[in-house]
Image: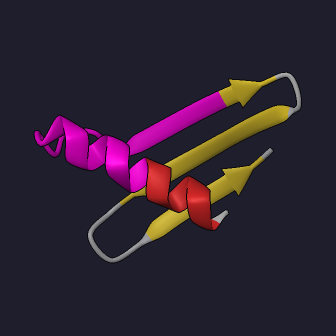
C-alpha cells in the first residue's frame, strides 16, 4: 500500500495542474481507487 500511495502522489505531482483528485485502477485481480486530498489519502481495494 505504501508504494501505491507514493505512485499516486507522483502522478498528481507530474500533472502539476492539481485537477486530478481521483485515480481508479482496474486489473484482473480487482479494482483499486485512490482519492487524494491535501491532508487525506483514501484507498479502496475492491
The residue lying at 34 percent from left, 49 percent from top is 10
Outermost residue toward the right?
29
The residue lying at 11 percent from left, 39 percent from top is 17
Quarter of the rendering occupied by the N terminus: bottom right
Describe residue 5's horizontal placement relative to residue 39 as left or right.
right
Q: Position of residue 5 (x, y in %)?
A: 51, 60
Q: Position of residue 9 (x, y in %)?
A: 37, 55
Determine if the magenta segment contains residue 10.
Answer: yes
**Visible in this render: residue 21?**
no
First to last magenta residue range:
8-25
| Colour pattern of the rendering | secondary structure
Q: Give the camera-side residue of 3 and 30.
A: 3
Outermost residue toward the bottom?
39
The residue lying at 28 percent from left, 39 percent from top is 20
Describe residue 42's horizontal placement relative to residue 20 as left or right.
right
- Above or below 31: residue 39: below
**Visible in this render: residue 19?**
yes
Amino acid at each position: 500500500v505504501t508504494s501505491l500511495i507514493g505512485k499516486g502522489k507522483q502522478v498528481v505531482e507530474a500533472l502539476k495542474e492539481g485537477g486530478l483528485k481521483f485515480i481508479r485502477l482496474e486489473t484482473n485481480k480487482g479494482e483499486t481507487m485512490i482519492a487524494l486530498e491535501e491532508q487525506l489519502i483514501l484507498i479502496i481495494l475492491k
